[in-house]
Each structure stands twice: as structure tokens, then as C-alpha cells.
Amino acid sequence: GALTGAWHQVCELAGTPIKPWVKAAKPLALHESTLVIAVPNDFSRERVAVRHRDWIESTLAGHFGRPIHLAVSVDPSLETDLEDATASPELPLDAPTLGMGAAPVPGASNGDRLNPKYTFENFVIGSSNRFAHAAAVAVAEAPGKSYNPLMIYGPSGLGKTHLLHGIGHYVRQYFPQVRVKYVSTEELTNDFINAISENRTVEFRKTYRDIDVLLIDDIQFLESKIQTQEEFFHTFNTLHNAQKQIVMTSDRPPKALEALEPRLRSRFEWGLLTDIQPPDLETRIAILRKKATSEHLSATPEVLEFIAGKIATNIRELEGALIRVTAFASLNHQPVDMRLAEEVLKDLIPEGVEAQITPPLIMSQTANYFNITVDDLCGPARTHVLVTARQIAMYLCRELTDFSLPAIGRLFGGRDHTTVMHANKKIRQLMAERRTIYNQVTELTNRIKQAASAR
Ligand code: ADP
Ligand code: MG
């Protein structure tokens, strides 16, 4: 019935490497919002429940029209000759191709740019972000009725985008009739430029004004874009006059956005301004603990404390370190203990260079490292080396910079954001499975950081 139908849809969307596991799984029951399936062994359970949970859950959510939690149980009687499939060493590096820009990432096709992990539930509150969090929740609970606009500012990697998506998720969940639009400023600018060149400004206005909540990320990128500023000024006024909610993030407070039109700058100060600061040690430990639990990464409390002690100013880096440590442990079939953590993090480049890292730097370093050109990285060729290099470069852009998925896709020869998302997942997974990939990513990251700090 409904269950089999839902699971059939999941099977349809599964990529080649995972298909055998998904097909071997058996849907057992749908209880409220939890769908229980059984798989033959722990190994498949790990694959399905950890690595593939996200897209399976969003596929199911699409099927049932509400959030679905996937619970995976093990039923050894389902064991078949699957082991052959699991033993295959040559997993395709890339997703099955549907043309250059269209690596299929199931669940990402709903046009929804919100990262499913960036929810209020997954946000750890500490003294550094308490106020920003409270403001975001207040806005999400009563869009347009409390602080308008709300502007959250602070340096990179401290949770601004996470809070912005959190508002989006919350509003969508509790007020499904409220129309929410999330864009990065870079997308907004692009949309606008395209609209002008294609004579579609009327449509452009409609998409940005016929909404109830507008979430705009990284508004500092409006600086110096005179025409887009002008257009946004009118959009802002229209929405604000109609008591529609506007939420923005920025790496600086409005006062410091010097290349922004004064009338726009002053509007940004109409509502509530709140900053977000680097987390203290306790919060950093709590964030790591939460991350370890949600991603099923096992590490001792001592190790989490050690990592939190090493990385103080950027939560993205903090998570990156945890991922590196656990990937290294998995590669070597070792437990995540202090000795291992110390070894992996011994060459940690001092913090503070993150801001200097840009996608072009990553692309040129990656090209160099693989002995190819940046044009190769952006081009259509799909040889093994190029695909790996391209995916690693995309992964690093995602890990080391603030750039959005669509923005990264555009830099890589106009690829779709789902391709970037896929590359990111793929490399993360391969780092834990293949030593060469782990080593390449680690070494390249170090080179990039060194190049950035030498600037
Ligand atoms: P920003 O937009 O400020 O550069 P992000 O929102 O992209 O930062 O956050 C960087 C990473 O850190 C994301 O993976 C995010 O989920 C995580 N993160 C940031 N703050 C928190 C928090 N308070 N609790 C849990 N995770 C957080
Ligand atoms: Mg951000």
C-alpha cells in the first residue's frame, strides 16, 4: 500500500552504489511521523541510516507531504547475496550523469534552498548567540509582527546562515500558508541582472514582492552594486510597508557597510540589529557533542574537549576538525581517542586565515595540485582525475568559504547547485573510505591555508 509505494519512490531515486541496499530494505510500518524499515545487517544499517538519511527522509517527506523520520532496524533474515555489492571497490566516483550540471541529488529538487540540518533544534545556544537566536525565534513565531527588519551580523562561521534557515524551516512547518523566500545576496544580484538583460523585471519584482517572509543572506555583497541596491530599496519598502518580514545577515553592522547607499543603510537599522560572537569553550563542546550525535560520529568527551580547545573562532572549522578526526579513525579502523586526535590535528594551521580563502584560490591550488588547469575544473570533461579534482575543489569551497551552493556551481562552469551538494557529500563519504582521498583533501587544505596566510 502507501508504505510500499513510498519505498518504491526511494528505490527509484537511489544512486547506483546504494541501490542494492535500498532495494533490500523492507518498509515495516509508518507510525505517526516515523517510518520504520528493516535491513539485513549493521553495515547496511549504517549506510542507509547515516550516510543516506537526509535524502531518504526528504523523499519520504515529499511523498507523504510532512516531515518523516526514518528508523532503521536490522533483520538478519533479509540477508541475501548483497555482500558482493558491498565488496565492490569501484564505486563510481560521480553520480550517474544526466548531462553536465545535473547530478541527481534526490530530495534536493524541490526548489528549496534550505539546508535541512540548519534548524532551531540543531542550534546550540550559548552566551555568544543567545540574543540572536531569541530574535530569530521571535521573528519566526510572528513574522512581520515583532522586529522588522531583523539583521544578524558577525564574522564568518558563527551560525548566521543557520539561524536564517532556521527561521525558514520554522515558518514553513508552522505556517504553511506563509510564503517564504530565502536567497543569498549573490543570487538576488544575479536574478536581477538576468531579469534586466532578459526584460523580465516585472517578473523579478513579482517573485521578490509577492511573499510574506524574505530571508537574505550576506547582504554585505550588495556593497557597490548600485543598480541592485536601487531595486532592492524598492523591494524593501514594498515589503516593509505591507508588514512583511525581512531578515538579513551580514558580516558587518550596517554602519560599517560603507559602499551601501545611506538610505538603505539607515533602513537596515530600523528594526533590530543583533550580533553573533565566537562561542565560548562550553558552547563549542556542546556544539561538537550535538554534531557527533546527529552524524553518528563516536568520539570520547575528552577528544571533543580537545578539538574545542584547539579551534575557537569558527564553528565551520570546528566541525571540519571533528569530521577529519573521525574520518581518519574510520580509515584506519581505529577508535577516536586522544592519541589519534592529536595526530590528526597536529599540523592545524593557526586560525584567522579563513577570511582570506576564496573559491578562486581554492580552484587554482586544486588545479595545481592535480596538475590540471582551472579551465579543466570548470569544463565538461569527465575523466576520473578531473571528476575527483572537481569534486574535491567544490567540497573545499563549501567547507572553507561562505559561498552558497548556487554560487559555487556558477564558478565551476555554471553547474547546478545539486551538483555541488552531491560533490560535497561524495567527498565527505570518500574521505572516510579511501586513504588517497583523505590524504589529498588534507594536503590540499593545508596548501590552501598556507597560500591564504602568505597573502
Ligand atoms: P555563517 O553564516 O555565520 O558564516 P553558518 O551558519 O554557515 O555560519 O555556520 C557554520 C557551521 O557551523 C554550520 O554548519 C552551522 O550548522 C554550524 N553552527 C554555527 N552555529 C551553531 C550553533 N550555535 N549550534 C550548532 N551548529 C552551529
Ligand atoms: Mg553564512
Image (cartoon, rainbow, N blue to C red):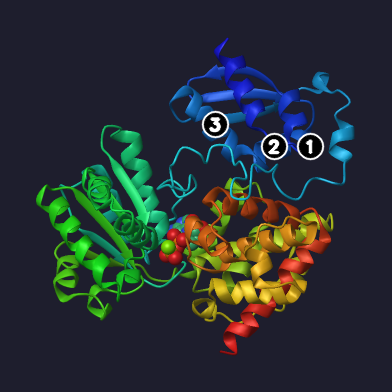
Amino acid residing under circle 1: Phe
Q: Secondary structure at mark 2?
A: loop
Quadrant where the C terminus is found in the figure: bottom right
Nearer to me, 207 or 133: 207
Amino acid residing under circle 3: Thr
Residue furthest to the bottom: 454
Image coords of residue 444 (percent x, y): 71, 73
Q: Residue at x 58, y 51 (%)?
A: 421
Disc number placed over residue 43 in the picture, else none: 1
Q: Secondary structure at mark 3?
A: helix
Residue to which mark 2 is pinned = 15
**Badge 1: residue crowd in 10 Å (few <14, some 14–19, many ≥20):** some
Nearer to me, 16 or 338: 16
Residue furthest to the left: 241
* Label 1 or label 3, whichever comes before in sequence order: 1
* Label 1 or label 2, whichever comes before in sequence order: 2
Instruction: State the CA–CA distance, disc 2 to disc 3.
Output: 13 Å
Residue to which mark 3 is pinned = 59
Image coords of residue 112 (percent x, y): 43, 42
Amino acid residing under circle 2: Gly
Which numbered mark, 1 or 2, is in the foreground of this view? Answer: 2
* Label 2 or label 3, whichever comes before in sequence order: 2
